[in-house]
Every structure is written in structure tokens, then in C-alpha cells.
Amino acid sequence: MGDDEHQARADPGVPLRRLAAQQRGAIRVDLILDAAGRLVAERGYEKMTTSHVALRARVSTGVLYQFFADKRAIVRALSARNLDRYLGRLEQVIRSGPFPDWHAAADAAVDLFVAMSREDPGFRAVRFGDVVDAHLLDVTSDNDSYLATRLAGLLATDLGVTIDESAELALVMAIKIADVLVGFAFARQPDGDDAIIQHAKVLIRLHLDLALGIGSADRPGP
């Protein structure tokens, strides 16, 4: 059965068609998501099929369809897993602080994103879902805005930082700067162009200084 037939049965709000309650099922889900990430990195999302994913994951297509309705649902679940893993590791980084200043914290967030992109081509290719749909993670906001909301929650919980509406918008813009320039860095060099990555970090610092009025005393005057 092809992707088109299963698309009609897909529920965009529930990527998993059957919750992997048992360990064996959870392992299969992880194998499917890992395989999908590698295939998106190698072939691109449009050329990937559920048959390709099942073959790479070494499961039958029947098993794959027990968990996922179609390839969009697979990549949506992979994007959500990428987000959870990124925020989980960032939380560990934050708790391992303290950071000397907020610039160091922003740098750490970018460095982690770069490190995960270097470790896993599937993470680099899929990231948080834009490869499929800018609203893949949440129908009410784009993927970067959803990430910013989750990040704001992390900052509030672990650093006691209050993030108002303007601060969250500043986070969204910082994420977009990082996403575009880090993507460009990896397009320039397979392991990421360090000069571009460092430039991205500087731009993010300057942007947040301007947007949030932090560190204005350290910035040169006009």
C-alpha cells in the first residue's frame, strides 16, 4: 500500500497510530525514526518513501504502518523527538552552569545545536520539521515559534528568567538567525564552516542586546 492511500487515513494531530507501550515497540519506533532521518539527509524528504524507511529500519511496511500513517507522520514524530532531545541536553548544559553572562548561555545553545548537527546527519536534515512544513509541530504557530515557547519555559524553570511577549519574539528571531546561518555553514562545509558559525553567534548576541536592551553598556555607540 502506497503513501497516497495512507495519507487519507492520517491524523495530523497524532503522528503515532499506535502508542509503543512495550519496549519492543519503542525500539521499532526509534529504528524507524533513525532510518527516516538518515534518508532525509541522503535523498531529501520528497524522494523518501515509507518503503524506503521500512527497508532501512529493517522492519516490514506492515509494522511501520502500525505506528505511523504515512511519511509525514514519521518526520513529524522525528521532529518532535529532535526537539525533546535538544531541549533535554540544553537543560543539562544550563544546569551545569553557572554561565558568566547571558552571552555565554546563548553561545552554549548554538554550540549544542551545532554539535547535534555534526553528530547526527538526520538531526541536521530534519531539525524541527521545516523540511516538511513550517507548521509541522503545532498548527497554531510555526516551528521556530513553538521552539521559542518551549525554550522560554526552560529558561523560566531553570534560570528563573521571565519571558514576556516581546522577549519570546526576540527568541523566535534569534532561532531563525541560528537556523539559517548554521544551515549555510553546513552547506559550505560538511562539518560546518566554523567562521560562519562564530559569525552567527555574534549576530545573535547583538540581536538580543538590541531586542532586550541587555548589555547596552558594552556596545559601541553610534
Image (cartoon, rainbow, N blue to C red):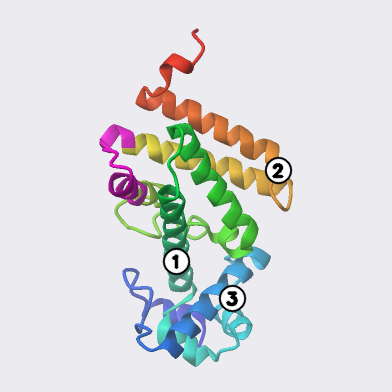
Residue 206 left/right relative to 95? right
Work out whether residue 100 or residue 30 is closer to the camera in this orientation and state it: 100
Please give the name of the residue rendered at 42% of the width and 17% of the height, measured from the top-left corner. Answer: 216
Please give the name of the residue rendered at 32% of the width and 48% of the height, measured from the top-left corner. Answer: 158
User: What's the residue type where badge 3 is placed?
Assistant: Ala
Residue 213's spot in the image, x, y percent? Answer: 36, 22
> Which quadrant of the figure has residue 67?
bottom left
Q: How crowded is mark 2: few (under 14 residues within 10 Å), some or many (20 or more)?
A: some
Q: What stretch is highlighted in magenta?
A: 150-167
Vertical comparison of 7 with 66: above or below: above
Q: Earlier in the sequence, mark 2 or mark 1?
A: 1
Q: Earlier in the sequence, mark 3 or mark 2?
A: 3
Q: Earlier in the sequence, mark 1 or mark 3?
A: 3
Q: Name the residue under label 3.
A: 35
Q: Name the residue under label 2.
A: 193
The majority secondary structure of the magenta stretch comes to helix
Work out whether residue 144 or residue 103 is closer to the camera in this orientation and state it: 103
Residue 110's spot in the image, x, y percent? Answer: 53, 44
Residue 148's spot in the image, x, y percent? Answer: 37, 46
Q: How crowded is mark 1: few (under 14 residues within 10 Å), some or many (20 or more)?
A: some
Reply yes or no: does residue 156 show up in magenta.
Answer: yes
Vertical comparison of 86 with 46: above or below: above
Label at residue 81:
1
Query: Is residue 47 at least partly visible in the picture?
Result: no
User: What's the residue type where badge 2 is placed?
Assistant: Asp
Please give the name of the residue rendered at 40% of the width and 50% of the height, measured from the top-left corner. Answer: 95
Vertical comparison of 183 with 67: above or below: above
